[in-house]
Image: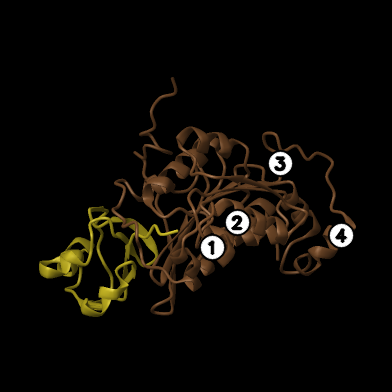
Amino acid sequence: MAPSTDAPTVKPGRSRGCHSRSSMNLSSRELERYGRQIGPGVLSEAAQLRLKESTALVTRVGGMGGPAALMLTMSGIGRLIVAHGGELISPDLNRQVLGTEEDLGRPRIEGFARRLRAANRFVEIEAIDHEPDDAEAAALARRCNVLLSCPPGFEERMRLNRAAVEAGIPLVDAAQWGMTGTLIAVRPGETACLACIYPETPPFEESFPVIGAISSAIGSLAALEAIKIISLTGQPLWGKMLIFDGYGGAVNTIELSRRKSCPVCGDGRRAEP
Amino acid sequence: MKVRVVYSGRSYPEAASLPGELELPPGATLAAALSMLCGGTRSRYLSSACLVAVSGKHVGSLADCQDRELHENDEILLIAPVAGG
């Protein structure tokens, strides 16, 4: 697979914040671990190294974020920050793949982080036991190379979108309802952000229907987009929305339009103080 | 002329009761097509936040989209926003 000529704004693979990984190499054990994903049609060794040098934030890590976090961990990203509050309850276990029966009634993030650490010894997992507010999301975004937005509502998605745009890092937004899901990759300042698409925050119910097979599929695709973006491999879904209709067995992709007056990435931004 | 209509996002359970194809006069606009789709009792199925795309290009939402002339075999895609995690 030829590397994308559509280079992202940020420099995926560069170290950010406290995650300094200069002069990094892949060890023989890492090369053994990732041997099936290094080669023609997958990742180059340099791309695998870019993954190792990168940090991603996934919030939250439930039905979609869980599989996304697991796939990023297994792929060999260097550091993964995961955020999710609350305690695991029985209805979570139809889709939250990082949860187990033993974890019921306990803080979700403890068991989730344990599961991720058990999946790959080469990855640093940083666990946050709550959903970041505006300030924390902005601070976290500045430490990351890519942000994966997988929360159960629009308010958090918009917060993560603002944080990504302000930090100038790519955002992968994964969302679902019932047997359908959507995926968007945002390249700040160049492609439509979530606020371009949704001028008014749409209503969305807290107890949305979901079957684990669709949330896992969309979450895994979100991880694939993040892997492509930070490893500079393939063609990310920049400026597009992929719509997977699992009920009808159809997939659509549309080109998204930026909004000139967007208050997050367009002329509608408030002036810097 | 005929244009195809596809419903996705969270509106798919109601899609069976909505037309999958519209017969429009030549030169008809997107606004006219959306008016046919969202008129009367159908409006309860399609919220104003629905994204609208014409033949693969996003043109806004039902509340505010760029009008344009439609052509034979265009596809109107209506995506009711989803945000589940």
Q: Which residue is mark 2?
A: A112
What SS does tag 2 mark?
Answer: helix
Q: Which residue is mark 4?
A: A29
Q: Nearer the viewer, mark 2 or mark 4?
A: 2
Residue type, numbered disc 3: Arg
Residue A100 seen = no
Q: Chain of mark 4?
A: A
Q: Which residue is mark 1?
A: A219
Residue that lies at the very extreme toward the top in this rendered image: A273
For the residues marked 4 and 1, what is the alpha-carbon distance in whole angstroms? 27 Å
* Residue A160: % across, % down: 47, 44
Q: Earlier in the sequence, mark 3 or mark 1?
A: 3
Q: Which residue is mark 3?
A: A14
Residue lying at 44% horizontally and 72% vertically, measured from the top left? A211
Residue A155 higher or lower than B83, as above or below: above
Residue A259 higher or lower than A185, as above or below: above
* Residue A169: % across, % down: 57, 42
Quarter holding the C terminus of chain A is: top left
Q: Earlier in the sequence, mark 2 or mark 4?
A: 4
Residue type, numbered disc 4: Arg
Image hue for chain B: yellow
Q: Is residue A114 left or right of residue A87?
A: right
Same-subunit check for callouts 3 and 1: yes
